[in-house]
């Protein structure tokens, strides 16, 4: 087994005691939240509200359009667009749950400053490697496929599975499905399927959720996909696929947030490829955003940490570059020979 499983388990009895009296609670996903971040935070919010807490999800910025249908989505406070209210919620929170990330810099500089100045105690629920130590209670498990599955186990450990509603089940199933690539990634375990089955039993409509996420494309997104695939370069010597999109191309095809979700995985569908990357130019932030995916023993988490100020999971990670798109691509290709043996194992 090529995963190095690491788990930090909280004192669930202490958490039960902490949650036994009503509190003001802020629930925070990472910046540019995906299905797992939104699903886990919305499900946890409903659970905490059932316990009598005044809980609110505060997202660093807006989630992509294909997640807006999720139950409770329009109750989310957007830190960028509703800054005064968001700051007030964080400042007044007695507890702050951070979900699907484990370093406060994952929310962006301005929101990070608000969280670091907050007086409330932190609770972390996350499945990424190398968690920071800012939380009073940390639930971290790199062997679990998604934070949504962890929220299910969190509620289970608090002996409250009977409180999972159809809406919560829908949110949790969405996050598990998206973070496992519809249950095809190696992180999908027998327990994952058992949790998914339980969520379907509790009301999650799996076919409808899949359709809402994957079968709701616009013509412009499919044209952008065609552009990305046209740009794709395969380097057989290193079993690597490289995809790139410039800001000009994004603008030409009317890019909306979420349109590039999953594009990096197309490289891994090519026979013989074990390492797939996508480089996306963002002129507003003056960076190149990078996603890495791999199969087997090659750790993109280690690769991203070593070269592109990033990290994530063994087979899925992200990073960024301050160079131009062309210089970033050149730099990446200069690094590849160092990993020739690992990529060809």
Image (cartoon, grey):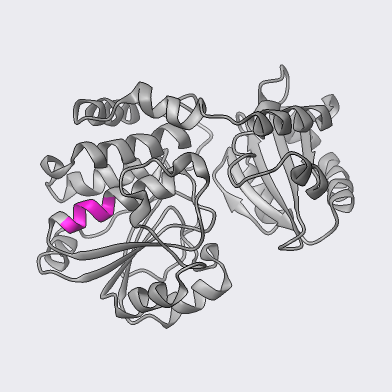
> Between 166 and 332, which is closer to the camera in this rendering?
166
Q: Residue at x 46, y 56 (%)?
A: 101
Give whichever of 345, 63 is nearer the camera: 63
Q: Does residue 116 appear to the left or right of 108 in the view shown?
A: left
* Depicted 265 relative to depicted 75: above or below: above
**In this rendering, does residue 319 appear at all?**
yes
Q: Quadrant of residue 45?
A: bottom left
Residue 247 at x, y percent in the picture = 79, 49
- The residue at 70%/30% (across/down) is 225
Q: Main secondary structure of the magenta part?
A: helix
List x then y, in percent, for residue 277: 72, 38
Image spot of residue 212 (x, y percent): 43, 30
Task: Judge from the rendering whether residue 68 lies leftward or rightward of residue 286; answer left or right.
Answer: left
Q: Is residue 329 magenta?
A: no
Residue drawn where x is 50% and y is 51% of the image: 63
Does residue 240 appear in this view?
no
- Magenta region, residue range: 44-49
334 left or right of 189 in image: right
- Nearer to us in this view, 273 or 61: 61
Q: Is residue 204 above or below residue 138?
A: above
Residue lying furthest top? 271
For image coordinates 89% across by 53% down, the residue present is 327
């Amino acid at each position: 087994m090529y995963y190095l499983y690491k788990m930090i388990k909280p004192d669930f009895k202490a958490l039960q005691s902490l949650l036994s009296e009503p509190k003001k609670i802020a629930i925070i996903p990472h910046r540019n939240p995906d299905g797992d971040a939104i699903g886990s935070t919305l499900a946890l919010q409903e659970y905490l509200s059932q316990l009598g807490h005044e809980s609110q999800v505060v997202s660093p910025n807006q989630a992509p359009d294909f997640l807006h249908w999720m139950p409770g989505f329009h109750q989310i406070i957007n830190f960028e667009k509703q800054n005064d209210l968001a700051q007030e919620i964080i400042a007044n929170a007695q507890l702050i749950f951070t979900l699907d990330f484990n370093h406060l810099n994952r929310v962006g500089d301005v929101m990070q400053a608000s969280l670091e100045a907050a007086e409330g105690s932190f609770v972390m629920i996350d499945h990424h490697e190398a968690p920071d130590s800012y939380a009073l209670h940390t639930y971290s498990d790199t062997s679990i496929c998604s934070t949504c599955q962890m929220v299910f186990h969190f509620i289970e450990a608090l002996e409250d599975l009977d409180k999972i509603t159809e809406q919560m089940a829908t949110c949790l199933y969405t996050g598990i499905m998206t973070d496992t690539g519809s249950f095809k990634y190696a992180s999908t375990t027998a327990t994952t399927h058992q949790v998914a089955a339980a969520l379907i039993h509790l009301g999650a409509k799996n076919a409808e959720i899949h359709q809402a996420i994957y079968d709701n494309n616009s013509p412009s997104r499919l044209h952008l996909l065609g552009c990305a695939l046209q740009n794709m370069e395969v380097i057989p010597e290193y079993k690597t696929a490289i995809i790139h999109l410039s800001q000009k191309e994004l603008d030409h095809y009317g890019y909306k947030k979420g349109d590039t979700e999953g594009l990096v995985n197309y490289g891994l569908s090519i026979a013989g490829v074990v390492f797939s990357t996508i480089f996306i130019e963002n002129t507003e932030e003056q960076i190149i955003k990078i996603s890495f995916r791999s199969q087997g023993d090659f750790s993109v988490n280690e690769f991203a940490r070593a070269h592109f100020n990033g990290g994530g999971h063994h087979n899925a990670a992200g990073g960024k570059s301050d160079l131009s798109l062309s210089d970033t691509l050149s730099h990446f290709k200069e690094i590849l020979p160092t990993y020739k043996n690992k990529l060809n194992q």
